[in-house]
Image: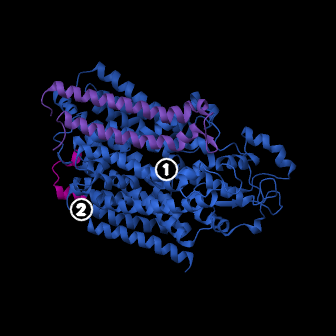
Chain colours: A blue, B purple
Amino acid sequence: MSQFAINIMFVGGSFLIYILIAVWAKAGSTKDFYVAGGGVHPITNGMAIGADWMSAASFISMAGIIAASGYASSAYLMGWTGGYVLLAMLLAPYLRKFGKFTVPEFIGDRFYSKQARLVAVICLIVASLTYVIGQMAGAGVAFSRFLEVDSTTGLMIAAVVIFIYSVLGGMKGITYTQVAQYIVLIIAYTIPAVFISFQLTGNPVPALGLFSTHIDSGMPILDKLNQVITDVGFSEYSADVDSHLNMVLFTLTLMIGTAGLPHVIIRFFTVPKVADARWSAGWALVFIALLYLTAPAVASMARLNLMTTVYPDGTAAEPIRYEDRPQWVKEWEVTGLIKYVDKNEDGRIQMYNDGSDPAAQAFKPQAEARGWEGNELDVNRDIIVLANPEIANLPGWVIGLIAAGGLAAALSTAAGLLLAISSAVSHDLIKGSINPGITDKGELLAARISMAVAIVVATYLGANPPGFAAQVVALAFGIAAASLFPALMMGIFSKRINNTGAIAGMLSGLVFTLSYIFVYKGWFFIPGTANLADIPANWVLGISPLSIGAIGALVNFAVAFAVANATEEPPVEIQELVESVRYPRGAGQAQDH
Amino acid sequence: MPGHSYDAEKYWKANLRLIFGSLIVWALVSYGFGIVLRPMLSGIPIGGTDLGFWFAQQGSILTFIGLIFHYAWRMNRLDKQFGVDEE
């Protein structure tokens, strides 16, 4: 059977399962649609959160980023998991006790203000929509490589599949589909990693293989990797970062951003009890950790394999001839994600660090002495995971599995985000402001229509990604960290914060964070409008635009406290509401007004 | 709602103490061992690298899992003790 047929079989088979689940889990009421009827078991919910959380970024990109920069990228590993500690202790149980359908609804009720709810809706839509673009684009890459269709056609197929199970089933359909998607993606991620870890270290558990001995050299694998890459001018894989402050703030931004992202928070509304919300967070992190503990192993081993491919006889010998390059390099060249330019016209592939950093400068004389005229191989870091099975010469079915896994990761996250968007539109905007008298049936229809519209918009943006697609992660986490997380936390932990304080806090956190990002990335990401070049020398105190969300959150807290203390106390019934979310008794199930 | 507000206050204080303790550990393993204190731990080797590297890439995640389950277990017990659990 051809590789193409195998891929079709795996991807088609997984899609069929998702659709069958959707038909089985059709939503009959707004409660089914928004919170899956409120009866999801905490372990099931944990698994669904895992799939919801692990996006194309986690599955496809993260290992590639770590492979490229080593220790410095640990911020992603800690940031995207540490947020669950905050969720479990500071937000999820209390919001579950509050027992409504959406995040803006809590903010609106707690701060007794329609404006506050509206600000929250806008933050939610911007954060979720920017995030969903990345998922659609990721699905497009996976389609174009494995199913040999162009990425627009691939996106259309993905959109139809998401449409069927999310419009039909709402949260109920999405939750049970995500359980299936979690299983597909974790198997797909783990199997190649197990093979590769076993080949390189003899240890079949990748998380342990990372700290084991490399069979060929007899050295610890990380030592071997450090040696091979420093030989060609890269800095050490385990090298420390220049600015601890920046790494701390970046990690913190990712953590509080994670805890503040609405599509994650609403998952905790689907379990029956407050106690289950706490367990759910733990289970979610267990399922997430299965991938996150494997990712750093995949990263370092893929980097080593790549180096061995280019320098089969060691870094001191000449690199491989272009005509002898392996099949997988040829296939990825077709997609443009691997590019080769023979700068010194010797027919070989020189891959080394020709950048401007100190390590590269130190290596320059050596490169010149060897007749090298610049790095000749560009490998897009997004292909590290997708190409992993091919790099390690694994059988064809593993490649089919990776294709299905990458798509499962992208689709499950996209569906969760789209649900957060559609519930904000139908529940917070339409029912909350425009037409409060709408019937349950009418609202359900509105939710389905807004879901459909969101899918169309996301598909369009995925097919025509705006130039700033790469920056959107900073934006989504920055917004969630600087606006939503502090507002939610203060709403629970302080009785003193009033409507004026909360709105002032959210807006100043948001404006501060966006301004800092725009100064370096361009105003509204319009090219050429950046005030300063986005390089470490220009950053205030060495804080990168990616790390600013944490400071934005501090601004939010400070402004909210100052303004709230200068204005009147919240009404008694609001103080009672705060009191009531702190005690689990009497939660009942998530419900409408 | 708990019987009288004195108990309610004690329950909330106990929760805050537990959160505070958990977050100290949370910060210590990630921002501490994983980043700021890494140079101090560089003398402790682990399979080709140092303890700080391990905390940054794996140790902190494992600790986070332990923290959440510990918190859930303690809180669910506190709920019952103070009679604020859901039947």
x and y percent of residue A396 in the render? 56, 72
x and y percent of residue A164 in the render? 33, 67
Q: Residue furthest left?
A: B3
Residues shaded magenta: A431-445
- Distance from Cα at disc 1 to Cα at disc 2: 33 Å
Residue type, label 2? Ala
x and y percent of residue A151 in the render? 52, 65
Is any part of residue A118 visible from this angle?
no
In the rendered image, the vertical position of residue A464 relative to residue A1, given as above or below: above
Which residue lies at the image location 61% right of the left edge and 58% below the top edge? A202
Q: Specify the subunit that label 1 lies on.
A: A
Q: Specify the subunit that label 2 lies on.
A: A
Tag 1 residue: A292
Labels 1, 2: front one: 1
Residue count near mark 2 (Cα–Cα under 10 Å), binned few <14, some 14–19, many ≥20: many
Q: Seen in the image, is A395 located left or right of residue A223?
A: left
Labels 1 and 2 share a subunit: yes
Looking at the picture, tell me which residue is in the foreground, A125 or A482. Answer: A482
Q: Seen in the image, is A591 located left or right of residue A286?
A: left
Is any part of residue A131 visible from this angle?
yes
Tag 2 residue: A27
Q: Is residue A181 magenta?
A: no
Looking at the picture, tell me which residue is in the foreground, A150 or A491. Answer: A491
